[in-house]
Image (cartoon, rainbow, N blue to C red):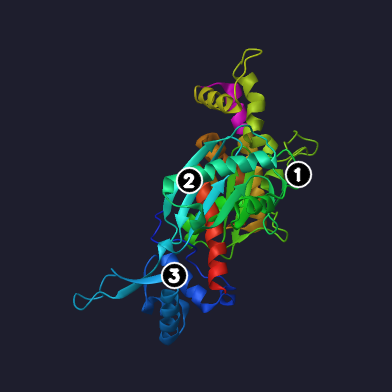
Amino acid sequence: MYNKHETFDVTDGCGPNLPVADQQADPLRQQVFEHVRAVGRAARADVTRALGISPGSVTTLTADLIATGLLREVEGLPRESGRGRPPVALEVVPESNYVIGIKLSDVRHTAVLTDFAGNICADATLMTSKPRKSLGELLDEVAALMESLIAKSGMAFSDISAVGIGVSGMVENQSGTIAWSPLLTHRNVPLGDAFQRRFEVPVYLDNDVNLLTLAELWFGAGREMSDFVVVTVEHGVGMGLVLNNRLFRGSRGMGMELGHTKVQLDGALCRCGQRGCLEAYIADYALAREAATAIDQPSGAARSPQRLLEELFVQAKDGNQSAQTIFRRAGRYLSVGLANVIQLFDPELVILAGERMRYDYLYEDDVIREMESLTLLEGRKPPRIVTHAWGDFVWARGATALALSAVTNATLRT
């Protein structure tokens, strides 16, 4: 089943709505808190039923959470009948913690500040000075971005409990080291340690597509899904995977590099330095490489890759056969990549996202049909495919989910 632009109703609250197999490892007080935050507002009886614990335990645990300033009582749940007082509900105290989420990019950085209930308090954007930069230059831009965000929110930096950052490339989530990124001039950059020394606030790093996947899991389509995949196509090709309602990173936190899986031996040169990677055929720079010829760009004319792609798309829509061939070839390679993902992980849902999802050649019916023809379905229904052409801020909001999760663990597992 394929829907080109499906939208999802997001209920109140934030965070995964489905239980996970190892949830019992979390303290009960954390389970209570996370359930209330996920549904937005919940009566104690609802918590009792949802978690399968005794009313007495819920009363004790919620009293503790209220006393520590993490939950509060409110009125507002509808009565089950027309008589009597409305039941008292519980909700997260939003101002108990604040976090910042940042998406770093080669064109513009974006940031979002949210409270502990996941509500957006402020956002900010900063155009980058150049595509590739040193660690010091990157931290200077992050500092300017956060200063703008804090000024908009009217808060102080001391109010921030944690920062989440998404970076394209290979990110070691546990150590905060960037093994490789197209944004940085060096490899194995200790961005996490350098950030914490400079700003003296806990920071959590991840691959940017993992954070877009967290945005779907916490705020979007994935809240009701136990297994789904996010594939992004823009400056590179990325993938995020949720298994059993949790983000899967691989054993060393550097998995899901779909863009660097090989689709052609000794093929096109990828920006990672190797040949034949999937993104070397469908990412921005791959399409721009052939665009100048397709649109008869005059010799010596200088246009940005973005402008080249926009004109290529316009000409393809106007009937330029060369431009259409470039997009269709990219779409076929995307079919191969998606078929491999489905064959390996058998997800319920595949979400296509990223800036290039505005180019319908990459997700038209022919692409989906070819993907299905390359997959051994054996009479089973293929997974649902949807496209989300999100803006930049949703990536930053996914970074807030990373920070919110870390602050929740630190606060409630103590």
Residue identifier under label 2:
149
> x, y percentage for residue 133?
68, 36
Residue at mark 3: 70
Q: Is residue 6 visible?
A: no
Cα distance between the residues tagged 3 and 2: 24 Å
Q: Residue 187, labelled with which disc?
A: 1
Q: Which mark is residue 165?
A: none
Per the rendered image, the range of residues in magenta is 319-329
Nearer to the camera, 66 or 216: 66
Give the CA separation, mark 3 to mark 1: 41 Å
- Mark 3 vs 2: CB contact within 8 A: no
Report the amino acid beneath label 1: Arg
Considering the numbered disc 3 on the image, is that residue within a helix, a strand or a loop?
A: loop
> Is residue 14 part of the magenta span, yes or no?
no
Q: CA distance from mark 1 to mark 2?
A: 29 Å
* Residue drawn at 31 percent across, 75 percent down: 88
Crowd around label 2: few <14 · some 14–19 · many ≥20 (10 Å)? many
Which sits earlier in the primary sequence, circle 1 or circle 2? Answer: 2
Q: Residue at x 54, y 64 (%)?
A: 407
Q: Is the residue marked by circle 1 packed among few (<14), some (14-19), or many (20+) residues within 10 Å?
A: few
